[in-house]
Image (spheres, rainbow, N blue to C red):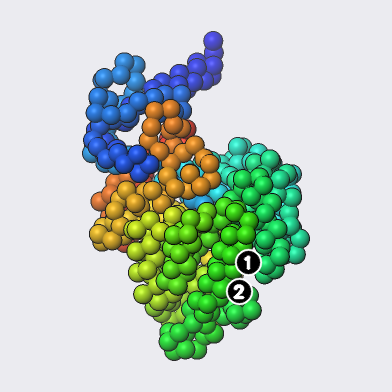
Amino acid sequence: MDAQDEQHDTDRRRQHRPLALVNARLVDPASGLDAFGGLLIENGVIADLGMHIMEGSVESAESLDCGGRTVAPGLIDMMVFCGEPGHEHRETLATASRAAAAGGVTTICCMPNTDPVIDDVALVDFILRRARDTALVHVHPMAAMTRDLKGEEMAEIGLLREAGAVAFTNGKTSVASARLMRNVLSYANDYGALVVHHLEDDSLTQDGVMNEGEVATRLGLRGIPTAAETIILERDIRLVELTGARYHASQISCRASLDVIRAAKARGLPVTCGVSVNHLTLNENDIGSYRTFFKMKPPLRTEDDRQAMVEGVSQGDIDVIVSAHDPRGAEGKRRPFAEANDGAVGLETMLSAALRLYHNGEVSLHRLLDALSARPAELLGLSGGRLAKGATADLVLIDLEMPWKVEPEQLRSKSKNTPFDEARFEGRALVTFVAGRPVYHYG
């Protein structure tokens, strides 16, 4: 055996050698577990966990002393816009996955807003194969619910589902036709598929660039009313009643929408919703002097709406927190506010920004991690999101207290359009494991 073969053999043994994470706070939102102990990783899955897992307690296992820090399920981000294929200058699956790993995210769901649009079986297959070859984390494509995202003709939902699409969406546009939306929901229901819909009435948002209200008037910018969101949401709820389909509002941003969701859930409808971490931690006042990195879709709302979103997460009415990761180059952001592209990167900052709510005492750690991992896994039918024997070892080691400052040039995304430029956070991912393999280590 030559030197190269010996090294390969050593690497192979190391890869299959069990790893014990010891002296850790184990937090599992799915089961309610919150206890000190250890966790054993073997062959890519969680082989055991509990107080009895200590350094030296498992023969032949390597040990990682967590120093009392938190081990939790890896985060699952249900809303990631990635440039590949067609816009690789903004982001690729490889660069997005590196940013995800650094943020404790072990699974990303990429949106179909690519060129060409992910509305064909071959493109779903391309994303899955490309991710296997280049990505550090799990990648699952959401397919377009309408051809070319134009909202005119329904895509082949059954074939796309069979090819591996985990959900169906129209990206950052709403389907205007109630008849077409009803057909989408009906077909999706036949295949047990989840429909994820953006909420925006185009006739009310035309030329609007930020939340309608006093701040927009003061800045001289055309506003977007919250009614543009709630009108589509209320229509969709009626269509869910007709079809019985599983429906997920991709992002809500205002108190009125939360009220609609609560009412729908009270009636027992299969309705869930998400909110971006931006709408949990920022409001319209952050736009300040026309800061384009704060231009988003939906727009940042009032402080009252932000507080409503936090309440919704805390009480479980809002199911999922997403990063809404949307990389944009300088050529699209360094422009007058009304002309700038909307969107912000967020994979690397989602966890730390969300932890602001925990440190402020507004949301418990269990509820926060549930919205970031367990609930998305449940909605999408994925194997992650939990600490349990036999579960895939998609994990994140978190230092809840570590202070750090966001420096855009250090972000792993190709684009640097973060609204948290030079923000100071408390808490971050230290180590991220995907199927038991460490894919990120801080420092």
Q: Nearer the viewer, residue 142 or 269?
A: 269
- Asked whether residue 90 appears in the rendered view, the answer is no
Q: Residue furthest top?
A: 1
- Please name the residue shown 70% across and 68% down the image: 177
Q: Which mark is residue 124?
A: none
- Please name the residue shown 39% across and 24% down the image: 47
- Please name the residue shown 55% across and 67% down the image: 233
Q: Nearer the viewer, residue 295 or 386?
A: 386
Indicate the quadrant containing the N terminus: top left, top right, bottom left or bottom right: top right
Q: Residues within 10 Å of mark 2 (few under 14, many from 20)?
A: many
Inter-mark Cα distance, 2 to 1: 7 Å
Residue 52 picture quarter: top left
Question: Element at badge 1?
Answer: loop
Q: Residue furthest right?
A: 153
Number of numbered tags placed on the structure image? 2
Question: Element at badge 2?
Answer: loop
- Asked whether residue 261 appears in the rendered view, the answer is yes
Q: Which mark is residue 201?
A: 2
Residue 422 picture quarter: bottom left
Q: Which residue is mark 1?
A: 174
Whichever of callouts 2 and 1 sits on the residue coming sooner in the sequence is: 1
Q: Position of residue 50 (x, y in %)?
A: 28, 29
- Residue 62 is left or right of residue 93, and the answer is left
- Please name the residue shown 30% across and 50% down the image: 365
Indicate the quadrant containing the C terminus: top left, top right, bottom left or bottom right: top left
Q: Amino acid at mark 1?
A: Ser
